[in-house]
Image (cartoon, rainbow, N blue to C red):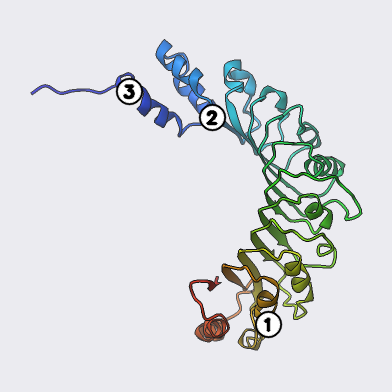
Amino acid sequence: MIKNFSTLESLPNEILFDLYGYFDAQELYKSFYNLNSRFNYLLKSLSNLSIHFRSLNTHLIYHPMIFFSQIRTLSIYSQENINFHQFPNLRSLIIWSPTDEQIFQINKESFPSIEYLCVSFSIAKPSICSLYQKIFSDGFPSLKSCYLCGCESPKNSIQWSQSPNLQYLHTTSNNSSILNSCPNLYSLTLDLLILDDLLINFRPHFNLKRLELIINSIIWLHDENNFEILFSSLPNIERLSFHKTFSIINSIDILFNYNWLSTIIIHCLPLLKQFTYHLHIFNLLNIDQTDLNVHLPRIKENFLKIYKNQSKFSLKIN
């Protein structure tokens, strides 16, 4: 009986291309480059590579220049000094806790075709303010999607020109100038501590169809006037996802008598097709929550009494 032994070289190009999709550019270079002329040819033909930097010991200098123009996604999780000009065809940039030098390199000259930008930072230092100026003054004409996450943001008094091509935005900022600078947003995620007066002073958005509103404060505020002002400025919302935190130290009666924003939603969002209310139970002190667990069915029942169409409205409790 003859045994057939398969080798990597015997695989067809289509399978090798599929295999390469599980590696980033560094791993591809270390594993396959210069094994033979066929592998080199296949690697050079790839046009959608990614690189992830997580260690200060990772150095771009070890990679062939031919790979730089093939990089489409760059993810940086270290504060190493990297020359961004090496990636002229980049489409997506993800960077966490960037240094000032890294932030100042994020510009149209380094990334003329960038479409997705994700920046996570701690405080709004001058370099971050400069980056906001570029993002929301059309400094990246091809930018379509942006994720900005930070504990602070530039002051509300700053004025920017518009970025008409930005369609998807995730922000932790309460700066109304941001929304005024993005007239053609299709999807918006607001990840805030509270919904305060600073955010709601913006011009109406008629193109926005999807809104995810995340309120992280454990203090249950009964005054929902700001929600009404916000939703009134977004009249064409079709899908709404609302996240709110309920601390275990609050009285359970709050949820028994709560109207789940129904009055505001019915009045302000006539085109709404789907609404999901995410209630996050917060119990940092490990207080006995048996009483709350017993009443969860009643809480859900209260929601369903108000929103009878379960295919359109839903309550999710964590």
* Residue 48 badge: 2
Q: Which residue is mark 1?
A: 250
* Residue 102 badge: none
Left or right of 29 in this view: 185: right
Picture coordinates of residue 281 (x, y %)? 60, 73
Circle nearer the N terminus (1, 2): 2
Residue placed most toward the observer, 95 or 138: 138
Q: Residues within 10 Å of mark 1 (few under 14, many from 20)?
A: few
* Type of amino acid at the residue the image marks with label 1: Asn
Q: Residue furthest top?
A: 37
Which one is closest to the eye, mark 3 or mark 1? 3
* Type of amino acid at the residue the image marks with label 2: Asn
CA separation, marks 3 and 1? Answer: 63 Å
Left or right of 285 in this view: 138: right
Secondary structure state at the residue bearing disc 2: loop
Q: Residues within 10 Å of mark 3 (few under 14, many from 20)?
A: few
Left or right of 226 in this view: 303: left
Report if the CB atoms under discs 2 and 3 are less than 8 Å apart.
no
Q: Residue furthest right?
A: 157
Q: Which residue is mark 3?
A: 12
Picture coordinates of residue 160 (x, y %)? 86, 46
* Type of amino acid at the residue the image marks with label 3: Pro
The residue that appears at 85% across and 45% down in the rendered structure is: 161
Secondary structure state at the residue bearing disc 3: loop
**Against 66, is 281 above or below?**
below
Report if the CB atoms under discs 1 and 2 are less than 8 Å apart.
no
- Quadrant where the N terminus is found in the figure: top left
Secondary structure state at the residue bearing disc 1: loop
Residue placed most toward the observer, 188 or 207: 207
The residue that appears at 59% across and 31% down in the rendered structure is: 72
**Against 161, is 275 above or below?**
below
Which one is closest to the eye, mark 1 or mark 2? 2
